[in-house]
Image (cartoon, rainbow, N blue to C red):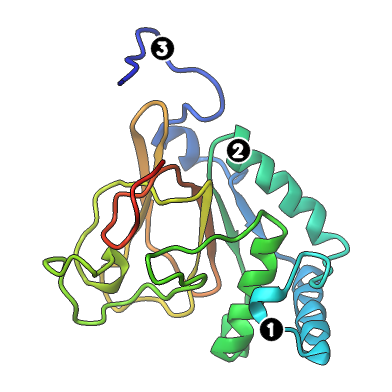
Amino acid sequence: MINVLRRPCTGPAAWADPDLADSEEWVLRLSPAQIDELEAALRAVRARGLPLLKMTAGDFPLPTLAGKLERIAGVLENGRGFVLVKRIPVERYSQAAANTIFWGVGRHLGVPVSQNASGHMLGHARDTGRSLADPGTRGYQTRARLPFHTDGSDALGLLCLRAARSGARTAVVSRPCGRDAACRPTSGEIRTAPAAAPIAAGLPPAT
């Protein structure tokens, strides 16, 4: 059953693009000290030899950044619904190290779930030459433009490892109002946003 709103949307999730254009409150720029925390946590995980999938927030200690991530979790759940984290120096890291940092930050935001029918917990959005005509292909494996959609989790995150040569614009939409904002990601950015139900190929239907 579809519920139709018959009164104006209100609240922090009911934003419009002009509301964000002159505001920086949706952007978290990491300080050198916060980057040091990420790298210290990375070293701690490596020293213990922890497998990525077994790592918890407690295994990835962030003395001051953890509080900001807790507030971000509240914004995702009850606020505008998205945050942009900037200045992660991904050029310093191997892909494995970047994976660990991304996973560690994510563990401070929630509990990870698999993102496709194969059970992948961490994937890479890039053009693999596959086509959406194949029912087993996910949109992020192609160069196709994807419409606004939701995935099978409460929130999702994207870490940009390399800026695309062209395209690759990321857009978010105000959930109750259908308003959107778009921008092109650069390396070292994490984007987080809510995601309610899967519509992409390869996922089981929501229950």
According to the picture, the residue beneath numbered tag 3 turns out to be: 8
Q: Which residue lies furthest to the top in this view?
A: 7
Q: Is residue 166 left or right of residue 23?
A: left
| Secondary structure under the numbered disc 1 in the rendered image | loop
Mark 1, Cα crowd under 10 Å, few <14 / some 14-19 / many 20+, is: few
Give me the residue at 60% from left, 38% from top.
Answer: 77
According to the picture, the residue beneath numbered tag 1 turns out to be: 51
Mark 2, Cα crowd under 10 Å, few <14 / some 14-19 / many 20+, is: some
Count of picture labels: 3
Mark 3, Cα crowd under 10 Å, few <14 / some 14-19 / many 20+, is: few
Q: What residue type is labelled 2?
A: Glu
Q: What residue type is labelled 1?
A: Pro
Q: In this view, does 174 lie to the left or right of 102?
A: left
Q: Quick check: marks 2 and 3 in contact, CB under 8 Å?
A: no
Give how far across and how far down residue 164 sits, in percent: 34, 76
How far is the residue under mark 2 from the one under mark 1? 29 Å
Question: Is residue 127 positioned above or below 133 on the image?
Answer: below
Give me the residue at 35% from left, 8% from top.
Answer: 6
Q: What residue type is labelled 3?
A: Pro
Quadrant in the rendering for residue 118: bottom left
Give how far across and how far down residue 146 sits, in percent: 24, 56
- Mark 1 or mark 3, earlier in chain: 3
Determine which of the numbered discs, if any, sits on residue 77 in the image: 2
Question: Is residue 127 positioned above or below 87 on the image?
Answer: below
Q: Residue furthest left?
A: 133
| Secondary structure under the numbered disc 2 in the rendered image | helix
- Quarter of the image that includes the C terminus: top left
Q: Is residue 57 left or right of residue 131?
A: right
Q: Disc 2 or disc 1, which is closer to the eye?
A: 1
How far is the residue under mark 2 from the one under mark 3? 20 Å
Between 127 and 30, the one nearer to me in the picture: 127
